[in-house]
């Protein structure tokens, strides 16, 4: 669904928000097999829809009046449960609403419900959810990507207009690419993380899924900006302007693109050729140490996760294994019973790389690699406006097709460097492979360049 | 990575692996540590570690009391409680 495609009709009274919301609720119900939603707020959504219709009738609609929104279930919304797709949070009721959601509600959006994800956003296929996998909207045997798989599918299958997800290493862009929609990972600090369950705080960002750039831009305008409740949220130093002259596009050298499937490689080359034909200059750029992007990311992310997830102790909220049943202490018993395999794996790795004897060899080293990667991007953006590369090495893979955790981690190959460096990146749908599965390319820009990235994505959409 | 080492890290992480899981996990964990260990081969002696991509000075606010959660809200999710307290098993003898 596309909100701004319908907005004029809503303004003129030719369509109603209530009809749109009822249509969404019907589709959500018909597509329960996709397992995209963990909770649906039908009653509340209809109530809000009626209010939106009144505002349209009175001629005073807010900027996103009646826009239908799905929210990843690791972002808190008062009045709806939050599980993070983990057994350890079953029955948890958030006591405050995330700033991003609060801003969207204030602008008139309607939260239809909460979407499925990999447990605590740890996964690339949505198979680690304690509530079952999310199915790919085109081929039910395939994965929709992860960790924000439910949000991606909700948008791709027309169950809502837009959705919020979260990114730590590609969890919005990768499922957006797999499902054929837009997925934004903003500059670190541009959207408040208040109300987002922390995974790796120095990498986490809330992101947006949409079917059009217009919807994406409008949502981003509303949710971005400083929030006193998140001291890492920032006001951009100054709006970035495009430099005069031809567009300058950076691309990766062939050896860095080597992990790509043929279909992805062809789509990449076509996009580059299109830029070239439209007058852009193409320059090969190097982000160093491609072989250690994934190690760097997993060391940093799991180290932070092991400390962030220490809060799940079975004492203050969530699952508690009763003392008469616990083997040993209730904290260990509750965590052992409540966390799934992938979450335990990552907590273990994080604990290991932070333990004395490993700290310097792994964690400190990863922080050094982080500087090399961030510095490389800074110097790259002195000579190019954007870097364009595939979002994923493959299209959507078969559910159960990757059983080795390390192989699964490697599917984040193209996405993690943007999180490591903090820069914004947008996955753009650019076509399909021979089996009809969507392909995504990402536009990566310098810090705070989201608006310019949207401009470029609009130009690309116009050319298709 | 030996099963003993895995057991030690698990106890630091407040997790437990059953004896029959331990060997499989140790094997898998060895492979994971090998993969991330690729980083140790890259020389980076002169590089300053980067902890945050947008370094922000310490943020403070005026020391004024604002709205807070009620006891009911704050304790509503506790698995076991007693009036204004969360109940836990006795820790001290």
Image (cartoon, coloured by chain):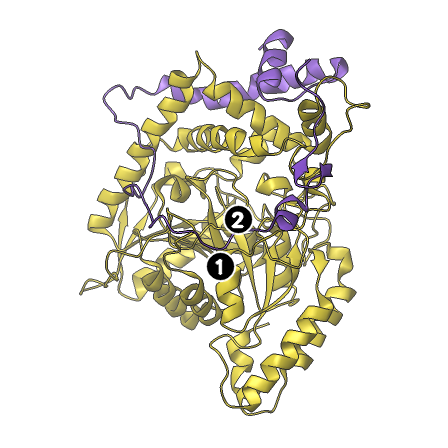
Chain colours: A yellow, B purple
The circle drawn on residue A11 is: none
Count of numbered labels shown in the rendering? 2
- Above or below, A341 relative to A428: above
Q: Along the polypeptide, which appears first: circle 1 or circle 2?
A: 1
| Residue matched to label 2 | A196
Estimate the x, y position of residue A178 in percent, counting from the top left.
Answer: 57, 52
On the question of residue B55 being in view, the answer is yes
- Residue at (40% x, 55% y) in the render: A227
Inter-mark Cα distance, 1 to 2: 9 Å
Q: Residue furthest front?
A: B83
Q: Specify the quadrant that holds the N terminus of chain B.
A: top right
Question: Element type at marker 2?
Answer: loop
Dots 1 and 2: beta carbons under 8 Å? yes
What subunit carries mark 2? A
What subunit carries mark 1? A
Residue nearest the observer in this picture, B56 or A282: B56
| Residue matched to label 1 | A100
On the question of residue A263 being in view, the answer is no
- Residue at (68% x, 32% y) in the render: A314
Q: Specify the quadrant that holds the C terminus of chain B.
A: top right
- Residue at (78% x, 28% y) in the render: A322
Question: Element type at marker 1?
Answer: helix
Residue nearest the observer in this picture, B12 or A142: B12
Q: Residues within 10 Å of mark 2 (few under 14, many from 20)?
A: many
Q: Which of the 4 image quarters holds residue A398? A: top right
């Amino acid at each position: 669904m596309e909100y701004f495609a319908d907005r004029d009709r809503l303004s003129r009274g030719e369509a109603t928000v209530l009809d749109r919301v009822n249509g969404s609720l019907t589709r959500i119900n018909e597509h329960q097999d996709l397992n995209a939603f963990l909770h649906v707020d039908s009653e509340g959504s209809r109530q809000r829809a009626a209010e939106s219709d009144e505002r349209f009738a009175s001629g005073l609609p807010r900027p996103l009046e009646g826009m239908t929104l799905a929210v990843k279930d690791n972002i808190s919304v008062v009045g709806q449960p939050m599980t993070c797709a983990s057994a350890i949070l079953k029955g948890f009721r958030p006591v405050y609403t995330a700033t991003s959601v609060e801003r969207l509600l204030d602008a008139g959006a309607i939260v239809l419900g909460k979407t499925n994800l990999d447990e605590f956003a740890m996964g690339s296929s949505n198979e680690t959810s304690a509530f079952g996998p999310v199915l790919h909207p085109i081929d039910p045997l395939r994965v929709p990507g992860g960790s924000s798989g439910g949000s991606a599918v909700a948008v791709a299958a027309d169950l809502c207009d837009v959705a919020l997800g979260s990114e730590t290493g590609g969890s919005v862009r990768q499922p957006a690419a797999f499902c054929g929609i837009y997925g934004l990972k903003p500059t670190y600090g541009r959207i408040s993380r208040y109300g987002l369950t922390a995974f790796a705080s120095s990498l986490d960002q809330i992101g947006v899924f949409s079917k059009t750039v217009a919807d994406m831009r409008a949502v981003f305008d509303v949710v971005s900006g400083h929030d006193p409740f998140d001291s890492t949220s920032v006001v951009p130093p100054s709006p970035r302007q495009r430099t005069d002259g031809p567009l300058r596009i950076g691309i990766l050298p062939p050896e860095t693109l080597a992990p790509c499937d043929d279909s992805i490689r062809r789509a990449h080359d076509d996009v580059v050729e299109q830029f070239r034909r439209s007058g852009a200059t193409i320059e090969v750029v190097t982000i160093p140490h491609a072989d250690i992007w994934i190690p760097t990311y997993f060391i940093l992310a799991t180290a932070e996760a092991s400390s962030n997830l220490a809060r799940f102790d079975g004492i203050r909220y969530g699952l508690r294994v009763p003392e008469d049943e616990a083997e040993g202490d209730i904290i260990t018993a509750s965590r052992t019973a409540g966390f799934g395999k992938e979450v335990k794996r990552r907590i273990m790795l994080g604990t290991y790389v932070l333990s004395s004897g490993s700290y310097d060899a792994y964690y400190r080293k990863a922080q050094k690699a982080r500087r090399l990667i961030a510095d490389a991007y800074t110097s790259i953006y002195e000579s190019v406006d954007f870097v364009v590369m595939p979002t994923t090495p493959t299209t959507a893979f078969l559910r159960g097709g990757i059983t080795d955790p390390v192989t699964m981690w490697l599917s984040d190959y193209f996405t993690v460097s943007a999180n490591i460096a903090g820069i914004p990146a947008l996955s753009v749908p650019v076509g399909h492979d021979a089996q009809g599965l969507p392909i995504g390319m990402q536009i990566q820009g310098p810090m705070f360049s989201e608006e310019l990235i949207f401009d470029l994505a609009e130009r690309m959409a116009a050319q298709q | 990575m030996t099963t003993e080492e895995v057991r030690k890290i698990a106890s630091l992480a407040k997790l437990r692996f059953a004896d029959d899981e331990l060997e499989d996990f140790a094997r898998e964990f060895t492979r994971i540590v090998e993969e991330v260990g690729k980083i140790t081969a890259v020389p980076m002696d002169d590089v300053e570690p980067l902890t945050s991509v947008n370094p922000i000075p310490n943020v403070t606010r005026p020391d004024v009391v604002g709205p807070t959660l009620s006891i009911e809200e704050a304790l509503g999710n506790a698995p076991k409680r007693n009036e204004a307290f969360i109940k836990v098993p006795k820790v001290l003898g």
